[in-house]
Image (tube, helix red, strand yellow):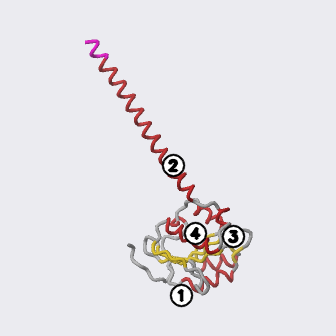
Amino acid sequence: MWPVLVIVLTGCAVGGTGRGLLRAHRGTVGQDRQWRAREEARARELSMTEVDALSWQEFEQYVADLFRRDGCTEVVVSGKRGDLRADVIGYLADGRKLVIQCKKYASERSVSSPDMQKFVGTARLEHGADVALFVTTCRTFTKAALGLAVRQDIVALHRDLLGSWVRAAHLESLIPLNGSGGGTRRPPA
Protein backbone atom coordinates (compact mmCIF):
# COMPACT_ATOMS: atom_id res chain seq x y z
CA MET A 1 0.00 0.00 0.00
CA TRP A 2 2.82 2.38 0.84
CA PRO A 3 4.48 1.91 -2.52
CA VAL A 4 1.18 2.70 -4.30
CA LEU A 5 0.60 5.80 -2.14
CA VAL A 6 4.17 6.99 -2.74
CA ILE A 7 3.76 6.49 -6.49
CA VAL A 8 0.42 8.37 -6.50
CA LEU A 9 1.79 11.26 -4.41
CA THR A 10 4.95 11.44 -6.51
CA GLY A 11 2.86 11.46 -9.68
CA CYS A 12 0.69 14.27 -8.32
CA ALA A 13 3.73 16.29 -7.27
CA VAL A 14 5.49 15.79 -10.59
CA GLY A 15 2.26 16.48 -12.51
CA GLY A 16 1.61 19.66 -10.51
CA THR A 17 5.16 20.84 -11.01
CA GLY A 18 4.95 19.96 -14.70
CA ARG A 19 1.72 21.90 -15.09
CA GLY A 20 3.25 24.88 -13.29
CA LEU A 21 6.33 24.75 -15.49
CA LEU A 22 4.17 24.41 -18.59
CA ARG A 23 2.08 27.43 -17.55
CA ALA A 24 5.23 29.45 -16.85
CA HIS A 25 6.69 28.40 -20.20
CA ARG A 26 3.51 29.36 -22.04
CA GLY A 27 3.53 32.76 -20.32
CA THR A 28 7.15 33.28 -21.31
CA VAL A 29 6.46 32.20 -24.88
CA GLY A 30 3.50 34.60 -25.06
CA GLN A 31 5.58 37.47 -23.70
CA ASP A 32 8.38 36.54 -26.08
CA ARG A 33 5.95 36.61 -29.03
CA GLN A 34 4.66 40.02 -27.98
CA TRP A 35 8.21 41.33 -27.61
CA ARG A 36 9.16 39.98 -31.06
CA ALA A 37 6.09 41.56 -32.64
CA ARG A 38 6.93 44.93 -31.03
CA GLU A 39 10.55 44.70 -32.11
CA GLU A 40 9.61 43.75 -35.67
CA ALA A 41 7.19 46.69 -35.86
CA ARG A 42 9.84 49.00 -34.44
CA ALA A 43 12.39 47.72 -36.96
CA ARG A 44 9.97 48.53 -39.81
CA GLU A 45 9.36 52.06 -38.63
CA LEU A 46 11.51 54.98 -39.62
CA SER A 47 13.01 57.15 -36.94
CA MET A 48 12.30 60.86 -37.13
CA THR A 49 15.91 61.37 -38.23
CA GLU A 50 15.18 59.13 -41.20
CA VAL A 51 11.91 60.97 -41.83
CA ASP A 52 13.88 64.24 -41.89
CA ALA A 53 16.12 62.77 -44.60
CA LEU A 54 13.16 62.09 -46.91
CA SER A 55 12.36 64.41 -49.82
CA TRP A 56 8.96 66.08 -49.70
CA GLN A 57 7.67 63.54 -52.25
CA GLU A 58 8.99 60.62 -50.19
CA PHE A 59 7.48 62.18 -47.06
CA GLU A 60 4.02 62.30 -48.68
CA GLN A 61 4.40 58.66 -49.74
CA TYR A 62 5.53 57.72 -46.23
CA VAL A 63 2.48 59.43 -44.69
CA ALA A 64 0.28 57.49 -47.14
CA ASP A 65 2.03 54.27 -46.04
CA LEU A 66 1.29 55.11 -42.39
CA PHE A 67 -2.40 55.54 -43.27
CA ARG A 68 -2.42 52.19 -45.03
CA ARG A 69 -0.66 50.57 -42.05
CA ASP A 70 -3.48 51.81 -39.83
CA GLY A 71 -6.26 50.37 -42.00
CA CYS A 72 -7.16 53.25 -44.33
CA THR A 73 -8.34 52.26 -47.77
CA GLU A 74 -8.29 53.78 -51.24
CA VAL A 75 -5.25 55.84 -50.24
CA VAL A 76 -3.99 58.04 -53.07
CA VAL A 77 -0.97 60.33 -53.02
CA SER A 78 -1.85 63.34 -55.14
CA GLY A 79 0.81 65.75 -53.93
CA LYS A 80 1.83 67.74 -56.97
CA ARG A 81 1.41 71.24 -58.33
CA GLY A 82 -2.29 72.04 -58.63
CA ASP A 83 -3.43 69.43 -56.07
CA LEU A 84 -5.45 72.10 -54.21
CA ARG A 85 -3.66 71.26 -50.95
CA ALA A 86 -4.67 67.59 -50.86
CA ASP A 87 -1.44 65.61 -50.74
CA VAL A 88 -3.00 62.33 -49.57
CA ILE A 89 -6.65 61.24 -49.75
CA GLY A 90 -8.18 58.05 -48.38
CA TYR A 91 -10.93 56.54 -46.26
CA LEU A 92 -10.89 55.51 -42.62
CA ALA A 93 -12.27 52.09 -41.68
CA ASP A 94 -15.56 53.72 -40.63
CA GLY A 95 -16.02 55.28 -44.09
CA ARG A 96 -15.02 58.86 -43.33
CA LYS A 97 -13.06 60.58 -46.07
CA LEU A 98 -9.64 61.76 -44.93
CA VAL A 99 -7.79 64.60 -46.68
CA ILE A 100 -4.20 65.30 -45.68
CA GLN A 101 -1.90 68.25 -46.25
CA CYS A 102 1.78 67.33 -45.71
CA LYS A 103 4.40 69.98 -45.01
CA LYS A 104 7.99 68.82 -44.70
CA TYR A 105 9.58 71.75 -42.94
CA ALA A 106 12.72 72.08 -40.84
CA SER A 107 11.98 71.14 -37.23
CA GLU A 108 12.63 74.68 -35.94
CA ARG A 109 10.16 76.26 -38.39
CA SER A 110 6.46 76.83 -37.62
CA VAL A 111 3.41 76.26 -39.79
CA SER A 112 1.98 79.69 -40.52
CA SER A 113 -1.57 80.95 -40.69
CA PRO A 114 -1.44 81.35 -44.51
CA ASP A 115 -0.43 77.65 -44.82
CA MET A 116 -3.41 76.66 -42.69
CA GLN A 117 -5.78 79.08 -44.45
CA LYS A 118 -5.02 77.52 -47.83
CA PHE A 119 -5.77 74.04 -46.51
CA VAL A 120 -8.93 75.16 -44.69
CA GLY A 121 -10.18 76.69 -47.94
CA THR A 122 -9.96 73.43 -49.90
CA ALA A 123 -10.11 70.43 -47.55
CA ARG A 124 -13.89 70.28 -47.22
CA LEU A 125 -15.15 72.50 -50.02
CA GLU A 126 -12.99 71.10 -52.83
CA HIS A 127 -12.21 67.61 -51.56
CA GLY A 128 -15.23 66.73 -49.37
CA ALA A 129 -13.17 65.84 -46.29
CA ASP A 130 -14.90 64.41 -43.26
CA VAL A 131 -11.55 64.55 -41.48
CA ALA A 132 -8.93 67.12 -42.50
CA LEU A 133 -5.42 66.46 -41.26
CA PHE A 134 -2.42 68.78 -41.51
CA VAL A 135 0.80 66.81 -40.93
CA THR A 136 4.15 68.53 -40.52
CA THR A 137 7.71 67.71 -39.55
CA CYS A 138 8.13 71.00 -37.68
CA ARG A 139 7.59 71.33 -33.95
CA THR A 140 4.91 74.02 -33.86
CA PHE A 141 2.04 75.77 -35.52
CA THR A 142 1.83 79.52 -35.01
CA LYS A 143 -0.83 80.64 -32.58
CA ALA A 144 -2.93 81.99 -35.48
CA ALA A 145 -2.57 78.75 -37.47
CA LEU A 146 -3.50 76.60 -34.49
CA GLY A 147 -6.47 78.83 -33.63
CA LEU A 148 -7.72 78.53 -37.20
CA ALA A 149 -7.26 74.75 -37.12
CA VAL A 150 -9.29 74.48 -33.92
CA ARG A 151 -12.09 76.73 -35.22
CA GLN A 152 -12.26 74.88 -38.55
CA ASP A 153 -11.99 71.37 -37.10
CA ILE A 154 -8.61 70.63 -38.71
CA VAL A 155 -6.42 68.05 -36.96
CA ALA A 156 -2.97 69.64 -36.59
CA LEU A 157 -0.28 66.97 -36.29
CA HIS A 158 3.09 68.51 -35.37
CA ARG A 159 6.49 66.79 -35.12
CA ASP A 160 5.98 65.23 -31.68
CA LEU A 161 2.63 63.69 -32.62
CA LEU A 162 4.06 62.58 -35.96
CA GLY A 163 6.90 60.91 -34.04
CA SER A 164 4.36 59.01 -31.93
CA TRP A 165 2.55 57.91 -35.07
CA VAL A 166 5.82 56.83 -36.71
CA ARG A 167 6.59 54.79 -33.57
CA ALA A 168 3.32 52.86 -34.00
CA ALA A 169 0.65 55.00 -32.32
CA HIS A 170 -2.52 54.19 -34.26
CA LEU A 171 -4.03 56.90 -36.47
CA GLU A 172 -7.41 56.58 -34.73
CA SER A 173 -5.77 57.72 -31.46
CA LEU A 174 -4.68 60.96 -33.15
CA ILE A 175 -7.94 62.05 -34.80
CA PRO A 176 -11.48 62.71 -33.54
CA LEU A 177 -13.91 59.80 -33.49
CA ASN A 178 -16.64 61.64 -35.40
CA GLY A 179 -15.85 64.07 -38.17
CA SER A 180 -18.07 67.12 -38.10
CA GLY A 181 -17.20 68.26 -41.61
CA GLY A 182 -19.69 68.31 -44.43
CA GLY A 183 -17.84 65.83 -46.62
CA THR A 184 -19.28 62.92 -48.51
CA ARG A 185 -19.37 59.75 -46.48
CA ARG A 186 -18.81 56.35 -47.96
CA PRO A 187 -20.28 53.39 -46.10
CA PRO A 188 -17.68 51.20 -44.33
CA ALA A 189 -16.51 48.24 -46.41
Near mark 4 (Cα within 10 A), the count class, few <14, some 14-19 or many ≥20, is some
**Which residue matches tag 2?**
36
Does the magenta-highlighted stretch encompass residue 3?
yes
Residue at 64% x, 84% y: name it.
117
Classify the position of the C terminus by image quarter. Answer: bottom left
> Upstream in the sequence, badge 1 or badge 3?
1
Horizontal and vertical percent position of residue 170: 52, 63
**Helix, strand or loop status at disc 1:** loop
Of label 4 and label 3, which has the lower sequence position?
Answer: 4
The residue that label 3 is drawn on is 138
Q: Quadrant of the N terminus?
A: top left
Q: Which residue range is magenta in the image?
A: 1-6
Q: Is residue 158 left or right of residue 68?
A: right
Query: Residue 115's x, y, as percent?
Result: 67, 81
Dot 4 falls on a residue whose secondary structure is helix
Q: Secondary structure at mark 2?
A: helix
In this image, 145 relative to 132: left or right?
right
* Mark closer to the observer (2, 3): 2
Instruction: Evaluate if marks 2 and 4 touch, with contact meaning CB atoms under 8 Å apart.
Output: no
Alpha carbons under labels 4 and 1: distance apart: 24 Å
Q: Earlier in the sequence, mark 2 or mark 3?
A: 2
- Where residue 144 appears, as percent x and y from the top left, is 69, 79
Amino acid under label 4? Tyr
